[in-house]
Amino acid sequence: MRMCLGCRTSRPKNELIRINGDAQERGYYVCDDPDCIARLLKNKRLGNSLKEALTELEGKR
Ligand SMILES: [Zn+2]
């Protein structure tokens, strides 16, 4: 189980999308859900590389 960083719900890994930041940041997981992605984007502590990866993810929808 992995925790979604958007809603803090634990889910099986295959229900989550892995987001990779730069070398200083480890991979993060978020639900395959636009609401969760949007919520995560509002997180001020998010690193820039993660933010970019999320924005890209959001743009694909
Ligand atoms: Zn979530």
Image (cartoon, rainbow, N blue to C red):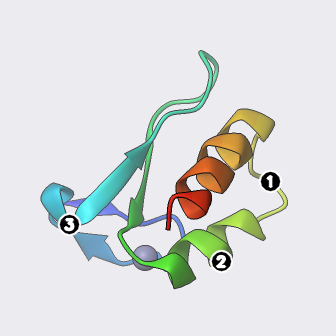
Residue depicted at x 71% and y 34%: 49
Q: Is residue 24 above or below residue 53?
A: above
Residue type indicated by callout 2: Arg
Q: Along the polypeptide, which appears first: circle 3 or circle 2?
A: 3
Compute the Cα span from label 1 to label 3. Answer: 24 Å
Q: Residue at x 56, y 69 (%)?
A: 37
Q: Secondary structure at mark 2?
A: helix
Mark 2 C-beta closer than 8 Å to ligand 1: yes
- Residue count near mark 2 (Cα–Cα under 10 Å), binned few <14, some 14–19, many ≥20: few
Report if the CB atoms under discs 1 and 3 are less than 8 Å apart: no
- 58 in relation to 28, above or below: below
Location of residue 9 (image quadrant) = bottom left
- Eyeballing the image, is 16 above or below 23? below
**In this image, 45 relative to 9: left or right?**
right
Residue 53: % across, % down: 61, 42
Binning the other alpha carbons within 10 Å of mark 3 as few (below 14), some (14 to 19) or many (20 upward) gives some
Instruction: Report which residue position mark 3 lands on.
Output: 15
Between discs 2 and 1, the one toward the N terminus? 2
Asked which secondary structure carries label 3, the reply is helix
**Residue type (three-letter) at the residue carrying disc 1:** Arg
Q: Is residue 20 above or below residue 35?
A: above
Q: Which residue position is annotated with label 2?
A: 39
Amino acid of disc 3: Glu
Left or right, 15 with respect to 38, comes to left
In the image, taking residue 36 as reference, residue 1 lies left or right, namely: left
Residue at coordinates 64% horizontally, 67% vertically from top-left?
40
User: Which quarter is ligand 1 in?
Assistant: bottom left
